[in-house]
Image (tube, rainbow, N blue to C red):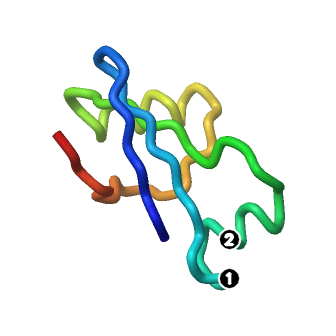
Amino acid sequence: MTTSFFKTGDSKIELLEATNPDSPIAKFIEKRGEGVHHIAFEVKDILSEMERLKNAGFTLLSDKPKKGLIIN
């Protein structure tokens, strides 16, 4: 996929473009249409935050944190 980042204040916006029709991004767009794929937040304690969200009724994609692309 092609990725572009834009920084605005303390926030970063990431735009993704599928370059392969079998990629997760292409499959997401095919199934759900264009739109927001995910939102990420930086937190001090990811495990506690995941537990809090689970207890609040959110559906998590994984029981463990997954490392994503890190940019500064």
Task: Give the quarter of the image for residue 17.
Answer: bottom right
Q: Nearer the viewer, residue 11 or 7?
A: 7
Residue 7 is left or right of residue 58, and the answer is: left
Q: Position of residue 56 (x, y in %)?
A: 58, 26
Q: Is residue 9 above or below residue 7?
A: above
Callout 2 crowding tier (Cα within 10 Å): few <14, some 14–19, many ≥20: some
Which residue sits at x=48%, y=58%?
62
Q: Position of residue 7 (x, y in %)?
A: 33, 29
Instruction: Residue 37: give its label.
Output: none
Which residue sits at x=28%, y=58%?
67
Q: Earlier in the sequence, mark 1 or mark 2?
A: 1
According to the picture, the residue beneath numbered tag 1 turns out to be: 21
Q: Position of residue 27 (x, y in %)?
A: 71, 72
Residue 21 is left or right of residue 34, and the answer is: left
Instruction: Look at the numbered disc 2 and give the secondary structure of its residue.
Output: helix
What distance separates the C-alpha of mark 1 from that of mark 2?
A: 5 Å
Callout 1 crowding tier (Cα within 10 Å): few <14, some 14–19, many ≥20: few
Which residue sits at x=64%, y=32%?
57
The reply to whether dot 1 and dot 2 touch (C-beta < 8 Å) is yes
Residue type at mark 1: give it. Answer: Pro
Which residue sits at x=62%, y=48%?
37
Instruction: Look at the numbered disc 1 and give the secondary structure of its residue.
Output: loop
According to the picture, the residue beneath numbered tag 2 turns out to be: 26
Residue type at mark 2: give it. Answer: Ala
